[in-house]
Amino acid sequence: MTEGVIFDTLRQALWISVMISSPLLAVALIAGVTVGLFQALTSVQEMTLTFVPKVGAMLIVFWVSMSFMTSTLISFFTDRLIPLIAGG
């Protein structure tokens, strides 16, 4: 195994981690900005108001995108890592 193969596999793994985490991070950002704007407009400074909607939105998006995340990881492992481990 050469350095090029290792770096290419690491690059692909990092890109897959960005692809998998981007829906959750985008929803957390949108929910955070929305709740922050709501708090600024209404002067309501409740700590649970920032936490509960963000976690709820992230759970819903995680549940919806779980099949995408799983299939992406499975294809990466079967196409890239298992052949490297087996020596192919």
Image (cartoon, rainbow, N blue to C red):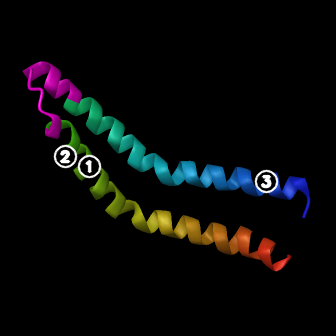
Amino acid on which disc 1 is placed: Val
Q: Which residue is mark 2?
A: 52
Left or right, 6 with respect to 14, comes to right
Q: Nearer the viewer, mark 2 or mark 3?
A: 2
Q: Which residue is mark 1?
A: 55
Between discs 1 and 3, the one toward the N terminus: 3
Q: Tell me if residue 44 is in the magenta stretch.
A: yes
Q: Tell me if residue 17 is in the magenta stretch.
A: no
Q: Are marks 2 and 1 in contact (CB under 8 Å)?
A: yes
Q: Which residue is mark 3?
A: 8
Left or right, 1 with respect to 39, comes to right
Amino acid on which disc 3 is placed: Asp
Compared to residue 45, the image places residue 22 above or below, namely below
**Which quarter of the picture shows residue 54?**
top left
Amino acid on which disc 2 is placed: Val
Left or right, 69 with respect to 9, comes to left
